[in-house]
Amino acid sequence: MSDSIKSFDQLKLSSQIQKSLDRMGFLAPTPVQAQTIPLMVDGYDVIAKAPTGSGKTFAFGIPIVEGLDYSITDIQAVIVCPTRELCIQIASELRELAAFCPKVHIATLYGGQPIAKQFKSLKQQPQIVVATPGRLLDHIGRGTVWLGNAYTAVLDEADEMLKMGFISDVRKILNTTPADTQMVMFSATISREVMDIAWQYQRNTVEVNISNEGENRPKIAQFSLVSSGNRRHQDMLNIIEQLDLHRVIVFCNMKSTVRHVSNRLIKSGCSVQGLHGDIPQRRRNHIMNGFRNGNFDVLVATDVAARGIDVEDVDAVFNYDIPDENEYYLHRIGRTGRAKQRGLSFTFVTENDAFRMRDIKKYTHSQITEVEYNKQGRLVLKSGTLLSNSINTDSH
Ligand code: ADP
Ligand code: MG
């Protein structure tokens, strides 16, 4: 039934929400939205598997905002996600969605921010709370958050969050919600931990499965190149220059590499900022906003720091190091090619990584083309061929 939904009209949204969707220029729901919204409105528990960039935030955001009861002063919906950045991101998207609903208050609760500031925003009686598990539990313990009347609980990026060791915190949080709370989980993969939580806390469950293929698959032209040590630096600069890339994210496996790569890029004259877990929260927010606003060209980041971050129009993603986990590969390259635009990704590999690369190709069902060097040892990069390649990468 929900498969047949093709337009926002069919979802019978309020005029306020419709107005903000119009203002954002969204013409039609994405597949995960078309399937999830009616289920959530009907009160089902949902477990949705959908790839990065498929529009999950509004898949739960729209039914939550639409379902608010303004006569209730308790928290009505809680969204739990793995990182501070993601909290901020989700809250800002929801605020934009609720731009014409003046009564909606949304609080963000995450570690690293002074708790006093959060007390203040909780005093405004938010209907919606977006939080990381640790800080949320802290508030619940202090009695500054009470979920005893919460109608909906969402776990966003559930696989990632549960894998990060938050599973017992998540359980403790869910244990404070009423037994009949609607429980909705979004995940790129349905891991063992995700299944465990689903078994324990969902009752009236419907599964939504959005494949990573065809229309949903972002058009990302993926390349690998054999390059290691400092050679990667020059190769990266060549690619950025030859393809005239303006917004680039470089992923590294370690904080120390983020520092090293940022410094080298700065010395080469690029405008660069690094993002990793040791950077104080306020500074991280500032950096993310700067990147979103185009104040600098290259963001160098670790996986955790960049988790779930949505920045429009990233031209290319570089994997300075091959990611340790296959899922990270998907999450990383998912930063480009958002909302069906085109994107490029370049993964640096050593000779020893051939096996890892094969594994990633198998896992992602994607074509990853090796970029070669010519006899002079220069990369063979003709922007024409590279870009025309990008049209065909979703065949596999
Ligand atoms: P996910 O959480 O699945 O990775 P997001 O919810 O962050 O994806 O959405 C990805 C991008 O698509 C965002 O820039 C968002 O604003 C945009 N988007 C969401 N819904 C729609 C829609 N219906 N039409 C067009 N773009 C959309
Ligand atoms: Mg998301």
Image (cartoon, grey):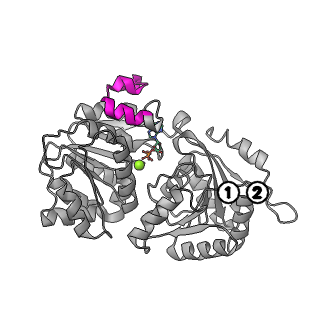
Identify the residue shown where x is 42% and y is 25%.
7
Of residues 37 and 175, the one nearer the viewer is 37
User: In the image, is 228 to the left or to the right of 278?
Assistant: right
Comes first in the chain, label 1 or label 2: 1
Q: Residues within 10 Å of mark 2 (few under 14, many from 20)?
A: few
Q: Circle 1 sits on which residue?
A: 224
Counting from the top left corner in percent of width and height, residue 31 is at 43, 33
Viewport quadrant of the C terminus: top right
Q: Amino acid at mark 1?
A: Ser
- Mark 1 or mark 2, whichever is nearer to me: 2
Q: Amino acid at mark 2?
A: Gln
| Residue 154 to residue 145: above or below | above
Of residues 38 and 95, the one nearer the viewer is 95
Describe the element under mark 2 as helix, strand or loop.
Answer: helix
Quarter occupied by residue 350 = bottom right
Counting from the top left corner in percent of width and height, residue 330 is at 52, 52
Of residues 294 and 264, the one nearer the viewer is 294
